[in-house]
Amino acid sequence: MLPVKSLLRCKSVCKSWYSLIAKPSFIFAHLNCSAALQRNHYILIKRFLKESNKSIMSVLSEEISGDDHVPVTEITIPHSNHFLQMLGPCNGLVCLTDHRDIILCNPSTRDFKVLPTPSLNYPQGLLSDTIGVGFGFDPLSSEYKVIRTVELYVDEESGGYYGFHSVNVKIYELSTDSWREIYAVMPYVWYFPRSEHLFNGAFHWWEDNEDHGGESMLSFHITMEVFQRIRFLDVCAFPDGNERDFLVLNESIALLLFNPSMHRSFDAWLMTEYSVSESWTILFTIGLLVQV
C-alpha cells in the first residue's frame, strides 16, 4: 500500500487520478488499510508564535533516523490566533477553532478547509456566544460531523451579561458542506475551553448549571444527536480554586482533580460503567506536591 506522500505525488499525474484519490471513499479505504497494517503514528503539537502572530502545527513522526533525529514537519495554520483550539484527531483529521472560525485540517496532506459560517437568526436584543464545539466521525452514516452550540443571552442597557435565553445547536456535515439546525433539548452549559472529548460515540463537555446541582458532564451522541447529563458523585466535589480535567483512560472516562490551596494533590477518578453516575471510583491520589 502506498504511503500518503506517494499518493500526493500521484494526484499530479492526471485529473482522473486526482479525482480518484480525492474521493472520500478512497480516503476512508486507505485509512482502514493503514490502521490494519499499523502504520507509523504521529504526534501533533499546536503552538502560537507571538513574534509572527500565527499558529503552527508541528507533526512529529515516530520514525527515528540513524542520528536519532526525530523528523518534524511545520505547518502554518490559516486564520490563526492565540485562542485557536485543536480538537481530535479523528481518522487523521483535526478540527481547529477559536469559536468563531472553524477549520478542518489533514496534517498528512496539509489540506485546510474553512467551514462556511452558519447563519444564526435571533430576536433583537439578544447576543450570542459559542459555548461548545465538537468534531468526530459518525460510523452509521460514514459522515464527518462538527457540532456547534451557541448560547443566546439578554443584553440590557449597560451591555453586561443579564440572563440566559436559549441555546442554538447546529450540525455541519462534510459531504454536503452545509449546516443544519437540530432541535435537541439542551440545558444551559458553561463551556470550559479545551474540555471537549470524543468517547463512546459521543462528545463530552464540562457543564456548570446551578439549577441541576452544579457541575457535571454533558454528552452529545454523534449518531442519535441527543444530549445527556452525567452527574458526578458528591465526593467528587469542586471547591473554589480546584483545577479539573477529564480524559479517556483504559477505555473509560477519567476525572482529574487538583486543589492547590489545600492538599496540593491530584485525585484520579474513573467512571467504571459509562453514563452511570454511581460508578465513579477513585483510582489513586498523587501528593503532596510541595513545589506546585
Image: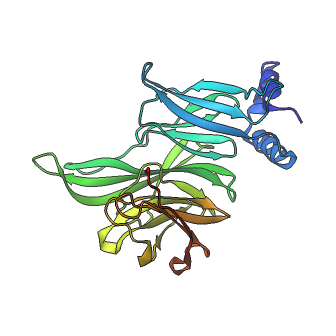
Q: Answer whether residue 147 is visible to the viewer in this image.
A: no
> 118 or 227, which is in the foreground?
227
Q: In percent of the image, x 87 and y 45: which residue is there?
A: 37
Q: Residue furthest front?
A: 290
Q: Residue 149 placed where, x, y %?
A: 42, 53
Q: Answer whether residue 139 is visible to the viewer in this image.
A: yes
- Write down the quadrant of residue 260 in the picture: bottom left
Q: Residue 215 placed where, x, y %?
A: 38, 67
Q: Residue furthest left?
A: 157
Describe residue 159's horizontal placement relative to residue 244 as left or right. Answer: left
Q: In percent of the image, x 41 and y 77: which residue is there?
A: 234
Q: Is 97 located above or below residue 154 in the figure?
A: above
Q: Is 237 located above or below residue 59 in the figure?
A: below
Color theme of the render: rainbow
Q: Residue 2 placed where, x, y %?
A: 87, 32
Q: Residue 151 placed where, x, y %?
A: 33, 54
Q: Name the quarter where the N terminus is drawn.
A: top right
Q: How many marks?
A: 0
> 247 or 156, which is in the foreground?
247
Q: Residue furthest right?
A: 1
Q: In percent of the image, x 75 and y 26: which residue is there?
A: 69
- Write down the quadrant of residue 109 in the picture: top right
